[in-house]
Image (cartoon, rainbow, N blue to C red):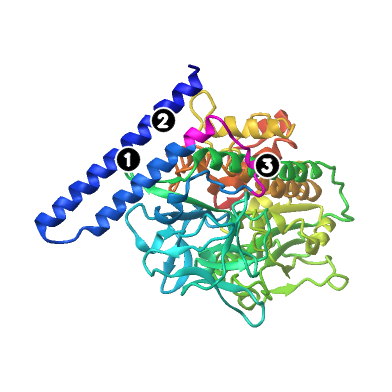
């Protein structure tokens, strides 16, 4: 007998043992019911559910010994999870999605007051977050919530957008379809189930199907408590791994191409020496105190004088047409600031405070973090006038200028090189530094070992703009390379971040902006420039 045949006999024996155990457990529960005089139907149902799952997994494993089909070729696959018919009506499911701009990403589908929402995954018994699929044997299926005993379906579309919110209601004739990208599409049209995350109140809606959107990739699994630690695991881990690998590889190709496009040289287009600090404003009035301090210091130092000619340029979120975004910022701006108008506003004379209305890239494309808005505003089409400056200070607003800026015209990029976000050991390395080097190498770029670079950059405008262009593309790339589908920080059971993915524990997705900046500046600095930087040039809260 060959090894494969022996495996099949062993698995068949395991299946028989499982069935026998279930029968004994059921008979024991029956006896307990008769003795105690009360019903434990819920316990019986849970036991049978677990038994059915065990049997179907054994059955699935046996089948895979002789046949295994790649997810790449799974179009039209009759059962994406290779599970038998019992599971489709008896197994209690958890459904989750990794929402890209709702860090930490993993959220579970729940029902709340008759509407669907994605919230933090509960690792306890929770009927509102538990689902069943009674007819998954068909090409399309219903999804029934265990708390309400009603179906997940689209509600009525909004009059202006025709976008429907996902609700929990009496079951209709409609059904959900599921494809190899993890998308759930409604049989009568309307698009694919889409999680909008906490910025939009955890709403779930139907949007046009787009296989590049991670917020449309839903996974099915079960709550497993048998190991002593509760985890939510995919119905079929090997299929889940295949699907994540395919999605990540596809995204890496696009992200890598975007980075390589930014490696072009930028030339100095300024006609006179003039400097500007560039800020991105967001989130209502939170910026106001910082901005007022900046303007006060700017005036006290004389940076706004005719001889110094130092401008403040603000890119703010205004005239918001996107359904979920922050209130307009322009109404809160100090009266010192005027709107920049192309072909009207001249960048001459004394220093000015200028503002430009624009949407940050994170509002237009969920593959970018909100933090990257502060770089994209330097390369947005509305920012073309920045090339008229000879020098630009790119910084965060929680800073203020000092007298060192007076008469300071550096010929290279100046930045703080002591930020400490990589947590290097005495040998100068860490898990973060090594992964950043590997990420650069994958792109064909060289990481020169210059780590822990700060966010405030000051230097020739064309170099700052080039670095911002690279940083925007690199942030998208690193979100895939380091934190994309199927990576360590988004593992099959990662309802919470693993320790190595938390701040101080290893690569942390909340600092992707800093990682992207680091790889970018390693392409511009040489060792002499790096070594020449003074420790006190740029601190956390003051600039030179």
Q: Which mark is residue 73?
A: 3
Mark 2 burial class by Cα count in 10 Å: few <14, some 14-19, many 20+: some
Q: How many marks?
A: 3
Q: Is residue 401 visible?
A: no
Q: Earlier in the sequence, mark 3 or mark 1?
A: 1
CA separation in Å, label 1 and label 2: 12 Å
- Of callouts 3 and 2, which one flags the residue occurring earlier in the amino acid sequence? 2
In reply to whether residue 180 is colored magenta, the answer given is no
Q: Is residue 45 visible?
A: yes
Q: Is residue 57 left or right of residue 71?
A: left
Residue designated by label 2: 11
Magenta segment: 61-76
Residue 508, x across and y down, in percent? 52, 43
Mark 1, secondary structure of its residue = helix
Side of 401 where 497 appears, left or right: left
Labels 3 & 1 near each other (Cβ < 8 A): no
Residue at x-position 72% and y-position 49%: 468
- On the image, which quarter does residue 305 sit in? bottom right
Q: Position of residue 61 (x, y in %)?
A: 48, 35
Q: Image point 52% across, 30% down: which residue?
A: 65
Q: Position of residue 294 (x, y in %)?
A: 61, 63
Residue projecting furthest to the bottom:
159
Q: Which residue is mark 1?
A: 19
In terms of depth relative to the viewer, which is nearer, 506 or 212?
212
> Do labels 3 and 2 touch, CB within 8 Å?
no
Disc 3 to disc 2, how far (Cα)? 27 Å
The first of marks 1 and 2 along the sequence is 2
């Amino acid at each position: 007998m060959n090894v494969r045949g022996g495996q099949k006999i062993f698995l068949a024996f395991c299946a028989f043992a499982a069935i026998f155990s279930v029968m004994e457990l059921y008979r024991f529960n029956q006896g307990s019911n008769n003795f105690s005089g009360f019903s434990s139907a819920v316990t019986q149902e849970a036991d049978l559910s677990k038994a059915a799952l065990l049997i179907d997994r054994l059955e699935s494993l046996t089948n895979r010994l002789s046949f295994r089909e790649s997810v790449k070729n799974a179009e039209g696959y009759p059962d994406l999870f290779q599970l038998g018919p019992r599971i489709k009506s008896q197994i209690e499911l958890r459904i989750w999605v990794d929402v890209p701009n709702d860090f930490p990403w993993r959220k579970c589908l729940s029902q709340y007051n008759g509407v669907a929402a994605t919230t933090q995954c509960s690792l306890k018994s929770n009927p509102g977050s538990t689902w069943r699929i009674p007819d998954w044997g068909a090409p399309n299926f219903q999804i029934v919530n265990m708390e309400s005993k009603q179906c997940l379906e689209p509600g009525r579309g909004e009059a202006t957008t025709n976008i429907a919110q996902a609700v929990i209601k009496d079951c209709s004739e409609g059904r959900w379809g599921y494809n190899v990208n993890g998308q759930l599409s409604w049989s009568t049209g309307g698009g694919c189930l889409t999680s909008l995350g906490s910025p939009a109140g955890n709403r779930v809606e139907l949007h046009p199907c787009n296989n590049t959107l991670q917020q449309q990739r839903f996974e099915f699994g079960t709550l497993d408590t048998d190991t002593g630690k509760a985890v939510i695991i995919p119905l079929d881990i090997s299929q889940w791994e295949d699907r994540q690998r395919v999605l990540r590889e596809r995204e890496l190709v696009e992200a890598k191409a975007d980075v390589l496009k930014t490696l072009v040289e930028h030339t100095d287009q300024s006609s006179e020496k003039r400097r500007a600090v560039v800020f991105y404003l967001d989130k209502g009035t939170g910026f106001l105190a910082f901005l007022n301090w900046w303007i006060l210091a700017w005036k006290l130092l004389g940076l706004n004088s005719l001889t110094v000619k130092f401008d403040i340029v603000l890119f703010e979120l205004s005239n918001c047409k996107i359904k979920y975004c922050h209130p307009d910022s322009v109404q809160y701006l100090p009266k010192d600031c005027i709107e920049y108008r192309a072909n009207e506003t001249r960048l001459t004379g004394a220093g000015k405070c200028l503002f430009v209305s624009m949407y940050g890239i994170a509002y237009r494309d969920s593959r970018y973090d909100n933090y990257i808005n502060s770089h994209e505003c330097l390369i947005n089409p509305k920012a073309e006038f920045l090339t008229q400056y000879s020098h630009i200070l790119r910084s965060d607003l929680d800073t203020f200028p000092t007298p060192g800026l007076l008469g300071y015209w550096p010929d290279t990029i100046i930045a703080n090189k002591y930020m400490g976000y990589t947590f290097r050991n005495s040998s100068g390395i860490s898990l973060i530094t090594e992964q950043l080097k590997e990420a650069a190498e994958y792109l064909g770029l060289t990481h020169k070992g210059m780590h822990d670079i700060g966010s405030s950059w000051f230097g020739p405008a064309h170099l700052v703009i080039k670095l911002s262009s690279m940083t925007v593309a690199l942030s998208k790339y690193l979100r895939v390379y380091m934190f994309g589908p199927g990576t360590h920080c988004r593992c099959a059971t990662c309802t919470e971040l693993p320790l190595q993915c938390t701040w101080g524990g290893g690569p942390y997705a909340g600092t992707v902006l800093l990682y992207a900046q680091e790889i970018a500046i390693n392409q511009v600095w040489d060792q002499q420039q790096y070594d020449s930087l003074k420790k006190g040039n740029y601190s956390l809260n003051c600039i030179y």
